Image: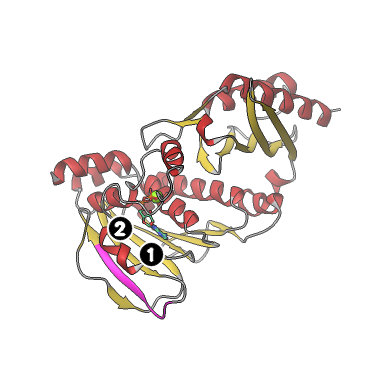
């Protein structure tokens, strides 16, 4: 059974970046205002995510890493969001099958926290009382028991780049949260963003001035139940922006996703409207009724499909086109 679990878990946690994404989403779900990530060997040796969120209650620790256990399923309506967020209560469990997970956590108002380790879905020991400052820290030694997998995964520089890219994306969307991402032993953080009310500030601190100074704000919405219902806002690059490939940072209902159809459609608009411009930088946040979002059932796929996707893509395309034309006059 353990082997079956390990294979299944390896599907969920294919690379270190998938573990980081799950851990950071948990920290966000716990209302954290500050999230720090520390990574050793691209995450193959160690991933540490620390937050200042509401913490995990003592009585929840024994089942924390059991498959399909989640604290996020209290109301019937939540079933809808479960569907839209893919596999639930699966992330921490999976991590304990491909690695060794240590949790240190304190709930608000408590005098001390608890530390406990997990392997193969179960607690290794009773939670031990310990000093803890705030929130939750989860340390993961990934793939420690999977020598073969570790060999095939070797390329820690590439893994680290993916983790930095992921944190950069989170940081420019969740601008009320401070993020940092640092390599073990490094003095400087590679992502360092302080909570700010200004999205442009966040983009400048994460992607740099050369990106932030070449952006145009965009907005679009529709509220016609017979065609599409959505709200979109974001920033798109102008003709002075220079890059060899498209950066598309897309959040739908506050979840980091990918939508290839939308990305391609926007690239087409850039080529048609600003033929001399480089590939674009695009940040978009789209809000839709949750039942209109269908996240691919496979947990490792970030690709979404939307109800009325063609209508929405066309509407966003035309807004982007007119914004680019005006900017170019
Ligand atoms: P899910 O997020 O789908 O509920 P996970 O396996 O990712 O499942 O996490 C299991 C549970 O562990 C969560 O429902 C939550 O109660 C708790 N949890 C995990 N990480 C944190 C965290 N950083 N802060 C508070 N609670 C957490
Ligand atoms: Mg989770």
Q: Position of residue 46 (x, y in %)?
A: 34, 58
Q: Does residue 306 appear in the picture of this structure?
A: yes
Ligand 1 location (quadrant): bottom left
311 is higher (above) or lower (below) than 56: above
Q: Is mark 2 within 8 Å of ligand 1?
A: yes
* Residue at mark 1: 56
Residue lying at 62% horizontally and 48% vertically, measured from the top left: 207
Residue lying at 27% horizontally and 58% vertically, measured from the top left: 63
- The span shown in magenta is 110-117
* Residue at mark 2: 64
Residue 282 or residue 51, whichever sits in front:
51
Residue lying at 48% horizontally and 61% vertically, measured from the top left: 36
Q: Does residue 279 appear in the picture of this structure?
A: no
Image quadrant in which you'd find residue 317? top right
Residue 96 or residue 112, whichever sits in front:
112
Could you tell whether 310 is left or right of 115 in the image?
right
3 is higher (above) or lower (below) than 325: below
Could you tell whether 94 is left or right of 136 in the image?
left
Q: Is mark 1 within 8 Å of ligand 1?
A: yes
Q: Are marks 1 and 2 in contact (CB under 8 Å)?
A: yes
Q: Position of residue 9 (x, y in %)?
A: 26, 43
Find numbered disc 2 in the image and state the secondary structure of the residue it sits on.
loop
Q: For residue 153: magenta?
A: no
4 is higher (above) or lower (below) than 206: above
Precedes in sequence: disc 1 or disc 2: 1
């Amino acid at each position: 059974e353990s082997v079956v679990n390990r294979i299944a878990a390896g599907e969920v946690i294919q690379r270190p970046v998938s573990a980081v994404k799950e851990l950071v989403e948990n920290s966000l779900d716990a209302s954290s205002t500050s999230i720090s990530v520390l990574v050793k060997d691209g995450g193959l040796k160690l991933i540490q995510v620390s937050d200042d969120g509401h913490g995990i209650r003592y009585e929840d620790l024994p089942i924390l890493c059991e498959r399909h256990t989640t604290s996020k399923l209290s109301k019937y309506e939540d079933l809808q969001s479960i569907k839209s967020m893919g596999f639930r209560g699966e992330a921490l469990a999976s991590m304990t099958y491909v690695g060794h997970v240590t949790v240190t956590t304190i709930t608000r108002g408590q005098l001390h926290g608890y530390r406990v380790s997990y392997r193969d879905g179960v607690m290794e020991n009773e939670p031990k009382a310990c000093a803890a400052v705030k929130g939750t820290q989860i340390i993961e030694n990934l793939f420690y028991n999977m020598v073969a997998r570790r060999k095939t995964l070797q390329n820690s520089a590439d893994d680290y780049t993916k983790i930095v890219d992921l944190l950069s994306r989170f940081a420019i969307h969740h601008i009320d949260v401070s993020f940092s991402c640092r390599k073990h032993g490094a003095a400087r953080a590679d992502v360092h963003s302080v909570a700010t009310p200004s999205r442009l500030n966040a983009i400048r601190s994460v992607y740099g001035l050369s990106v932030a100074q070449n952006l145009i704000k965009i907005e679009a919405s529709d509220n016609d139940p017979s065609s599409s219902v959505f709200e979109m806002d974001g920033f798109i690059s102008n003709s002075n922006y220079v890059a060899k490939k498209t950066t598309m940072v897309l959040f739908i209902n506050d979840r980091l996703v990918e939508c290839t159809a939308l990305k391609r459609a926007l690239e087409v608009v850039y080529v048609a409207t600003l033929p001399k411009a480089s590939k674009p930088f695009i940040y978009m946040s789209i809000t839709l009724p949750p039942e209109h979002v269908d996240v691919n059932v496979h947990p490792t796929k970030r690709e979404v499909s939307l109800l009325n996707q063609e209508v929405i893509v066309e509407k966003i395309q035309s807004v982007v086109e007119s914004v680019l034309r005006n900017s170019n006059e």
